[in-house]
Structure formats: structure tokens, C-alpha cells
Amino acid sequence: MVGALEFSLRWFEVPAYIMPTPSAIVAALFKEFPLLAPHLGYTLVELGAGFAIGASIGLVLAAVITQFPFAEKIIAPYILILVTTPMLALVPLLILRFGFGYTPRIIAVALAAGPMVMINAATGFRRVDSAKIALARSYGASTLQIFWKIRAPMALPMILVGLMIGAIFGLLTAVGAEMVGGGFGLGNRLTTYSSMIQMPQFFAVVLILSFLGILIYVIFFLIGKKWASWEA
């Protein structure tokens, strides 16, 4: 496919500002990578910090609403609002409040990742076989023991799915937030290269982001294969 695309673009003499050849994109990637490396680091910091905060809060809320049904009636409407509202719409407001640094981007990533983790984790906690819980109670297990010994291990596959989706949504939100405002990050590079019509460099950044997305999937797939292989 890459070879066919290279041949077609050269054969039809498509201008580079419309669609550069794959060879030009790879060349731009190697040439510009020393400049892009710091911006990649900024994006990873935003993603890592925001995802850690959002995922932690999401897991705690999932545990709370599955253990205390009345809490779900209080929390669920707000989670629904967060899920259905594009976090990028809040970035300008966050920038006005916290400036152009890391803070608004980390908050946006946390707000994007947290609900995804919470919804999937809560689904996993609820799918536990009630017969296992009844058996554990008959042996005198406490609520906390049932949660850690039965609910959490059985919900692990869904938790990993939530973490993977949350990480991918967090990456998209981080890049989008960088495009909205700020002078650093891969999203900022996308905006800069597109405004200067430097399409080989633009698609080089897209290639890096695609690799990050694939890496997130592979990491959680391997974690699931190691710790939740019993599901198969």
C-alpha cells in the first residue's frame, strides 16, 4: 500500500502541499525529529499526568457507585455530561483560568479519560456472578474482601478496556488542547506546519501520533494478556 501510494503520487505529479509522498514524510520525520522530540515529551507529560489523575478518580468513582447505589444517582448525571461534552470546548475557558501552561491541558485530559475509565470499570464490577458473592458471604467474607478478592479480579478485563479507551481519548484531547492554545506540544507543531504549508513535516507529526495510539493499544493488550488471560 505504501509503495502503491508512492508510485501514484509520483506518477500523477501530485504537489507536495496537497499530499507528500511517503518517502518525503519519512525523510521529514528523521530530519525534524530533533526538533519534535521536546514537543513529544511535552505531550507525553500532559497525557501521563492527566491520564493518571482521570483514571484514578474514575476507578474510585466506579467502586463507589457499584457499592453504594444511591451514589450513582448523584454522580451519574454529571458523568453523562462529561461523556457527551467535547472537552476541547472547555479548553479556552481553562486557558483563561490557568494560563497557557500544562495545567489546562492536564485538566482537559483528566476530564476526557476519567469518565471512560469509570463507565467501563463500573460495568465490570457489576458483571460479577452473584453466586460467587453469595458463596463468599456464606463463608463470612466482608464487603471489602469481596471487592478485592472477587469484584476487582473479575472486572479486570473491562477495567483494562476502560484504561485503553481513556488513554486514547486523553491523547486526542491533549493534541487538540495544544492546537487550541500554547506554544509547545505536538498539536502546536501540527498547527505551525499546516499554517506554513509544510505538509511532509505535518504528516510526520501525524505519523508520530499514530504510533503513540498504536503503542497505547499494544501496551494494554499485553497487560491484559498477562493479567486477564483467564477470560479467554
Image (tube, rainbow, N blue to C red):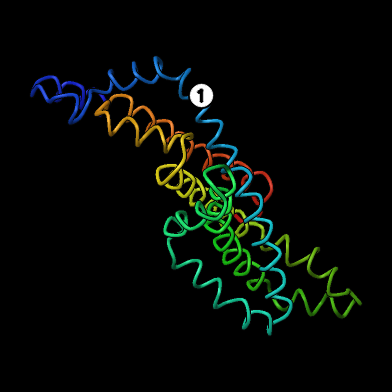
Among the 4 quarters of the image, the one containing residue 8: top left
Going by the image, does 41 lie left or right of 206? Answer: right
Q: Name the residue under label 1.
A: 37
Q: Is residue 127 above or below residue 20?
A: below
In which quadrant is the N terminus drawn? top left
In which quadrant is the C terminus drawn? bottom right
- In front: 146, or 112? 112
Going by the image, does 66 lie left or right of 178? Answer: right
Please tell me how crowded label 1 is: few (under 14), some (14-19), or many (20+) other residues with Cα within 10 Å.
few
Among the 4 quarters of the image, the one containing residue 30: top left
- Give x and y (percent) for residue 162: 57, 57
Q: Which residue is drawn at 50% across and 51% down?
A: 95
Going by the image, does 150 lie left or right of 116? Answer: right
Q: In this view, does 121 lie above or below 165?
A: below
- Give x and y (percent) for residue 129: 68, 74
- In front: 229, or 26? 26
* Amino acid at the residue labelled 1: Ala
Q: Is mark 1 on a helix, strand or loop?
A: helix
- Give x and y (percent) for residue 88: 43, 55
